Image: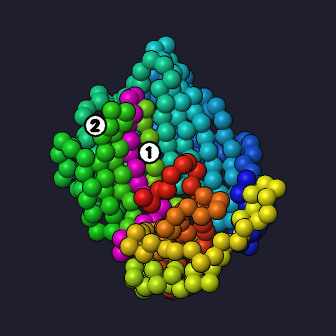
Amino acid sequence: MVQLKRIQKFLLPAVLVMATTILIFVPYAHSVDASIEEKALSFIKEVVQLDLSKYEVKIKDYFEEYLEHTVKKDITCSLKSAEGNLTVICQFANSSLYYCVMYVNEGKAFYIQPLSTIFDRAIGILERYKKWTRDESLNEMISTLKSVDGSENVTMTVGDWQFKFLITSQYVKFSWMYIPNKILYPNCLIISFAGNNFYFVDERSLYKIGNTELRLSRDEAIAVALKHLENYSFEIFMGDQPSIIVQNFTIVKEKITTELLSWPREDGAQYPYWKVDLPLDKLYPGNIYAICVNVWADTGSFSLCAIRIRRKLGHPNK
């Protein structure tokens, strides 16, 4: 196993945090929160439009998870009828639904209204969800959906949201990703159909946004990354063999790639950063082929440095 002494200072705190999280935040069973059960069944009936009168409905599982800023509550419902059975899982954060998935285990699902086209179903779900949540900001997403004819895959940006329509042989997916200033944040809304199964995610409010300002250009981020690597070295341990210190490596500058992403800081909010991947000219000991440097895009300060290990034969940059 390759051990990376150089980045132990990054890994050790992460291990400690993970250990602490395991001790504190493991979900555990509770008696069912009646308000959560009511909201889940309301969403299933009023937004998904399952005809609950056709089913024997039981709560199959329920648990709560207490995080630093969020209380998550998950409820699993079993819906059985003479012609089939379904499982519906709803997840809530601070009492707001952000996830629902419906599996048709056998038979078929009974809906209040007959099913129409995939696009009409998605539009109907969004319109009913807007009414259910009283969220007027969904109007823009509904308008975007109505503007697409569905004849081919589509990617388009409307305001701060990137809309994607993707159809494959296995599923159909409608997604909106939050990308202010072209920075990808985890906040999203997704509707997907896979056969008889249904998948819904609304994480637009799940993640707190700390900043969307972009004060560092791509070239400036690359300059910060290259500066950080001027005297950089890493030590490789390989079994019983003597360790190897790798330094004076060569970066293939014309193949440097970047991405604008986001990550939480100490306050739990999301902030933008440049992910700078710097390919090396060859495989170095330990199958190291590249170095990744993260630079905060709103401050220009260095965030993290990690090496990339090739798991298969051959050089990925060739």
Q: Which residue is disc 1 drawn over?
A: 200
SS assignment at label 2: helix
191 part of magenta stretch? yes
Q: Position of residue 280 (x, y in %)?
A: 51, 68
Which percent across, then down, holds residue 180?
37, 72
For the residue carrying disc 1, how many other residues have a C-alpha within 10 Å: few (<14), some (14-19), or many (20+)?
many
For mark 2, does the 10 Å Cα neighbourhood hold few (<14), some (14 to 19), or many (20 or more) residues?
Answer: some
Q: Secondary structure at mark 1?
A: strand
Q: Specify the color scheme.
A: rainbow
Q: Is residue 283 left or right of residue 122?
A: right
On residue 118, the disc is 2
Alpha-carbon span between mark 2 and mark 1? 14 Å
Which residue is painted at 44% across and 17% down in the image? Answer: 107
Image quadrant in which you'd find residue 11: bottom right
Under mark 2, the amino acid is Ile
Q: Amino acid at mark 1?
A: Phe
Residue under the point 25% across and 46% down: 153
Q: Residue 245 lies in what quarter of the image?
A: bottom right
Q: Dots 2 and 1: beta carbons under 8 Å?
A: no
Magenta stretch, residue numbers: 181-196
Q: Quadrant of residue 286?
A: bottom right
Q: Position of residue 182 (x, y in %)?
A: 36, 71
Residue 177 sits above or below residue 37 on the image:
below
Q: Residue at x 32, y 61 (%)?
A: 162
Residue 58 colored magenta?
no
Q: Residue at x 71, y 57 (%)?
A: 2
User: If you read the primary sequence from the N terminus, does the residue marked by circle 2 or circle 1 appear first?
Assistant: 2
